[in-house]
Image: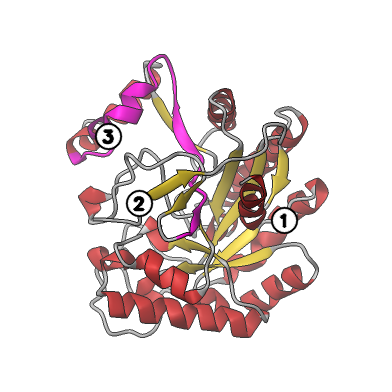
Amino acid sequence: MTIAPVLALAEFPEDMPPLVAVVVDTEEKFDWNAPFTRKTRDVSSVAEQIRAHSIFDRLGIVPTYVIDDPVVSDSSAAGLLREFHQDGRCEIGAHLHPWVSPPFNEEVNRYNSYHGNLPPAVEREKLLRLTEAIAKTFGHTPRVFKAGRYGLGPSTFDVLEECGYTVDCSVVPYSSFAEDGGPNFYGFPDRPYWSSNGLFEVPLSRGFFGYLPWVGERMPVAFDARLAVRMRLPGVLGRLGIARRSTLTPEGISIENQKRLVKQLLDRGHKVLTLTYHSSSLGIGCTPYARTEEERDRVVAALSEVLEWLQHTSGCRFTTVAAVRNAAVNSV
């Protein structure tokens, strides 16, 4: 699958402190292990974002909520986010889950859950309708996009440009979803870059630490191939201290491993980090990370501890993904 190629890595002022942006995949509840269905539109967990905002407000963080059709179509969920937005407490972007986004004229299956696999005209119409719905609800056209299931495809960036998006957050470094029919991101930069059609890409903060981190960076077969996963090779490499893949998220990643990842990235000269989670992980029983109230509380506690550590110990400054683009523009 061909995705818009890299034009140039972003450059930032040398004296700029490391920047951290928070991106929330704001979406409906659905069973991640069950077949996809158009009936999954429960967005009641969006109300639970007040738990995260007690942290964000205290630390001066303005998250970017990338929202999908069930969220923007729900008066209660959209109303809460609109209040946050009007108060300057968040920014709003778009997040496309094709199986619950009109028009509903494609077959619902795993392959089509990656919207980059859809016929270009179908993907285009879904993105156009979502963008228009968000603009109508929030009073401005969203400029930040994050693909549902990270499902970029060969036509996605052209449609994003047509819809007025300037920033994308869909790339997952050192990860491949090819075994499931999705994109392969090995070989893509693990730091912000300009794509060939002018979009600014802010990848997830994902990488490796250990005695031989390059094993993960250069050998995708060891982490994402079906046989490697079946043999639990990623876990073995991590427990042996050879190479552990980690992501800056409170979902399924320990606080210590998040900190180790950040230290590794900063040591390698990264100027921009993104912390991400799913809005549904602040509800109970909505994701594998928060099946019980106790697990949900651990997600919130991990979010709080890591964000406070980023601000007070690692010397990072909080920003938004849109502001990251502005910083790069100003440095050119």
Decide: marks 2, 3 in contact (CB < 8 A)?
no
Q: Quadrant of residue 43?
A: bottom right
Callout 3 environment at 10 Å: few (<14), some (14 to 19), or many (20+)?
some
Specify the label residue 62 is tagged with.
1
Q: Which mark is residue 5?
A: 2
The residues tagged by marks 1 and 3 sit, at their Cα atoms, a distance apart of 34 Å
Segment colored magenta: 198-226
Q: Are marks 1 and 3 in contact (CB under 8 Å)?
A: no
In this view, 70 is above or below 187:
below
Is 209 covered by the magenta stretch? yes
Which tag is nearer the camera, tag 2 or tag 1? 2
Q: CA distance from mark 2 to mark 3?
A: 20 Å
Going by the numbered disc 2, the residue's amino acid type is Pro
Residue 220 - label: 3
Image position of 284 with respect to 123: above or below: above
Residues 252 and 315: in front is 315
Q: Is residue 73 visible?
A: no
Q: Is residue 206 left or right of residue 78?
A: left
Numbered badge on residue 115: none
